[in-house]
Amino acid sequence: MTRQAFRVFLISLASLLAGLPLSLAAVSGLCALAGVGGVDRVHIVMVAGPVVWTCLWFAMLWVAGPRPGRSGNGQPGNRQTGNSL
């Protein structure tokens, strides 16, 4: 396993173990602040909690992903093609 793959694996594991409960708690807290209670609150948390967690997970994977490299000498206008005459 490469270093980058191991980093993405750790980010995914941390997101699952810590991010899911925290996102559920955050949505539940927002419902409590808004005054939503009972079955409506449970339904909102059941739907919005995993949605928030999924967005958080993809954001964490995007941050942990590989950085785009520069080609040539680092200047965008100087691309090298295979046809040199």
Image (cartoon, rainbow, N blue to C red):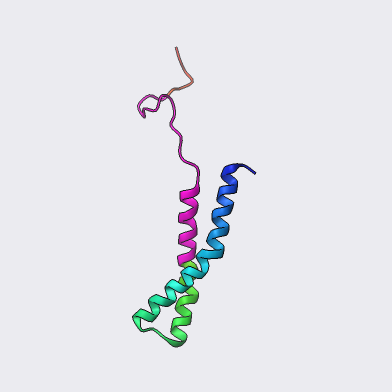
Q: Please identify the quarter of the rendering in which residue 4 is found.
A: top right
> Residue pushed farthest bottom?
38
The quarter of the image holding the C terminus is: top left
Relative to residue 58, is residue 23 depicted above or below? below
Tell me the residue at 46%/34% (across/down): 69
Where residue 6 sits in the image (x, y, percent)?
A: 60, 48
Is residue 72 highlighted in magenta?
yes
> Residue pushed farthest top?
85
Tell me the residue at 44%/29% (across/down): 71
Relative to residue 15, is residue 70 depicted above or below? above
Is residue 71 highlighted in magenta?
yes
Relative to residue 40, is residue 53 depicted above or below? above
Tell me the residue at 47%/80% (across/down): 43
Where residue 79 sits in the image (x, y, percent)?
A: 41, 25
Q: How many marks?
A: 0
Camera-side residue of 83 and 45: 45
Camera-side residue of 46 and 27: 27
The quarter of the image holding the N terminus is: top right
Where residue 38 sits in the image (x, y, percent)?
A: 45, 87
The magenta stretch spans which residues?
A: 52-79
Q: In this rendering, would 50 be left or right of 6?
A: left
Tell me the residue at 45%/55% (across/down): 59
Q: In this rendering, would 3 be left or right of 55?
A: right
